[in-house]
Amino acid sequence: MIEAIQESHYYNSLPFLLKGLRWTAFITFAGLFIGFILGAIFGLGRLSKSKIISTLSTVYVEVVRGTPMLAQILFIYAGLTKGIIGFNIDAVTASITAIAINAGAYIAEIVRGAVYSIEKGQHEAGRAMGLTQRQTMRYIIWPQAFKRMIPPLGNQFVISLKDTSLLSVIAIPEIVYQGKQYYNITYSPFQTLVMVCLLYLVITIPTSLYLRRLERKLDV
């Protein structure tokens, strides 16, 4: 009887976890969408000939990459709003902001590396065709660079997806938070956490396999 009850927790926890999956997916995609915009801006900013723009972009990247994600979440949700802005923002907005800012710093390096990897001859070819520097970047450099960004951007998706597990500290009902809620009620931490890990693996393993396949295809 006890074994049957324990086994049922593997299945009974699923509705809780799937509700958390919806929040995890929403925050991950929203955060990465904004993060890509930030990454493109600051990644190109690091390549700028303007020392001010380059320095500011570098500071952003180094500060974010050099501090823990958990500290960034708490800083945005509690430290920034209560200490500087003076009013609270809701946990979902803070979560998307934290994921966006964190991912943006890493995406900035992906963008910088991809653009920098394009041969200098491509820049010269654009100028020889009468294109301005901006047009050369838009029509020649960026399409080639974006193709090289796809695999590492996919890896960043997996990383950001897993980082959302830290959002449980501010009571976002993502997968880990929902799992904790369930096993606090049912006293079934082992079964519930097994399902939590399996749910992440169901997402991350196929994504990783697809990215490896895509990377091999793009290398051809």
Image: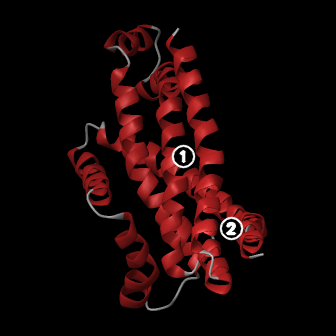
Which numbered disc, 1 or 2, marks the residue closer to the eye? Answer: 2
The answer to whether residue 7 is left or right of residue 85 is right
Image coordinates for residue 203, horizontal then vertical, percent? 64, 46
Q: For mark 2, give the secondary structure.
A: helix
**Residue under the point 51% across and 80% down:** 170
* Amino acid type of the residue tagged 1 in the rendering: Phe
Left or right: residue 18 versus residue 220 is right
Disc 1 marks which residue?
157
Q: Residue at x 48, y 44 (%)?
A: 156
Residue type at mark 2 is: Gly
Label 1 vs label 2: CA separation? 17 Å
Q: Quick check: 115 above or below 190?
A: above
Say whether residue 173 is visible. Answer: no
Q: Earlier in the sequence, mark 1 or mark 2?
A: 2
- Marking on residue 210: none
Q: Which residue is mark 2?
A: 20
Q: Nearer the viewer, residue 98 or 214?
A: 214
